Amino acid sequence: MKINISVFFQSPLNIFIFRHVSPRVSRRYLQLIGFLYYLVNRREKRRIARNVRDLLEGREEPHLERVTRDTFKGIFSHYFEKMCSAFMETEAIERYVRRHVRIEGGHLLDKALAKGKGCMLVTAHWGGVELIPWVLTVARWPASIVLECKTRRLAKALQRHESMTTPS
């Protein structure tokens, strides 16, 4: 039976590691096991690379190689954000966001919220988006999200942070 990447990354061992190491270490760890995952699942890796080539047909080889490499980095970033958001302690996630995220255009949110009507940010699921609620709440903006999870374990883990990420 083949295990998909989501189930693989959310294995009990990986959850344990994410709960007990820093985001920096867990990010490197996830990249390493992601590399191993695609080493074993070569067909899946080739299919992703072929999709990139099909999308960028006619582009030069160095560009195709860079985009393919960045695609895999994006996959790993997505799962890193998901695992952080679900399984790390709130304080560790907040520290990570403060150190590694820079907000551009925050004044636009402030301006919209000053009108007293709130505002809505909408994002397509193109890469990792799981840190967005953390970024907003660390910056002290109110945030509500619509969430759909593949597993009950992931939904439950994310919900444990729900009350902790509400700005006071």
Image (spheres, grey):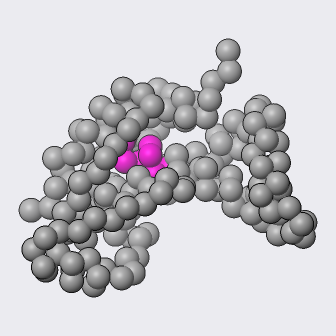
Highlighted range, magenta: 80-87
Query: Residue at the location (41% across, 48% down)?
Result: 84
Q: Looking at the picture, does residue 161 appear above or below residue 73?
A: above
The chief SS type of the magenta part is helix
User: Is the residue 168 above or below the residue 23 in the image?
Assistant: below
Magenta stretch: includes residue 151: no
Q: Position of residue 22 (x, y in %)?
A: 43, 52
What residue is shown at x 61% (from left), y 50% (from top)? 75
Q: Is residue 45 above or below residue 53?
A: above
Res. 32 image quadrant: top right
- What x and y, as percent, mark residue 14? 50, 34
**Front position in the image: 157 or 26:** 157
Figure quadrant of the C terminus: bottom left
Residue 10 vertical placement versus 119 (above, below): above
Provide residue 52's location: percent of width, then percent of height.
77, 55
Question: Is 83 one of the magenta-colored residues?
Answer: yes
Residue 42 visible in the current orientation: yes
Q: Residue at x 29, y 82 (%)?
A: 108
Residue 13 visible here: no
Q: Residue 127 occupies which quadrant of the picture?
A: bottom right
